[in-house]
Amino acid sequence: MVWGYGWYSLGELLVSGLGLAMIARYVPSRMGGFMMGGYYVAVGISQYLGSVVANYASIPEHITNPVDSLSIYVSLFNKLGFVGIGCTVIAVAMLPLMNKLSNTHAEHAATAGPLPAVRSEEFNTPA
């Protein structure tokens, strides 16, 4: 059980870092902080929705026989499975758009020249 939590935690750490890296890569720097904040809001909403799903999985107090609770879990996992399949279809449908945006970003990054030097007021450096 400890190994399971360890792998789960490692997966969450890697996904979080990857999500922030994708935001840093594809979002203009002037909007980076706002979009990263939006990412954390989305993570918070998903954690809330996880608690809602956990409440659906709770067994009423009057049910003591494990066989009687089976219908609750089967219904919940069927619904979650259909939602997962629906989200997968939406993600696959969005792949051409995401590839187009990624290629546009790569072409723009390849043709862009170096950024201009920044003048610092703090250190009184010339432009």
Image (cartoon, rainbow, N blue to C red):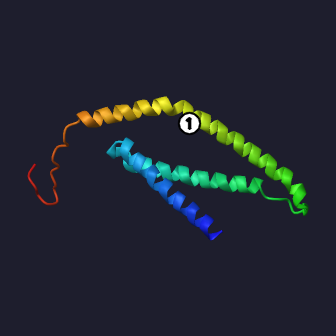
User: Could you say which is closer to the camera, residue 18 or residue 49?
Assistant: 18
Q: Where is residue 86 in the image (x, y as percent from the top left)?
A: 65, 36
Q: 13 or 7, which lies in front? A: 7
Q: Which residue is drawn at 63% across and 54% down?
A: 48
Residue 28, image x, y percentages: 34, 42
Front one among 23 and 14: 14
Up-down: is 6 above or below 91? below
Which amino acid type is marked by label 1? Ala
Where the N terminus falls, by quadrant?
Answer: bottom right
Along the horizontal axis of the image, is 55 left or right of 116? right
- Measured as percent of width and height from the top left, residue 39 is found at 49, 49
State whether residue 73 is above or below residue 93.
Answer: below
Residue at horizontal 52 percent and vertical 32 percent from the top: 94
Residue that extends furthest to the left in the rendered view of this protein: 126
Quarter of the figure with residue 69: bottom right
Determine the image quadrant of residue 63: bottom right
Q: Residue at x 68, y 41 (%)?
A: 83
The count of marks equals 1
Q: Residues within 10 Å of mark 1 (few under 14, many from 20)?
A: few
Residue 65 shown left or right of residue 7 in the figure = right
- Residue situated furthest front in the rendering: 3
69 up-or-down from 6: above or below: above
Q: Is residue 15 left or right of residue 125?
A: right
Mark 1 lies on a secondary structure that is helix
Mark 1 lies on residue: 91
Compared to residue 107, the image places residue 19 above or below, namely below
Q: Residue at x 71, y 52 (%)?
A: 53
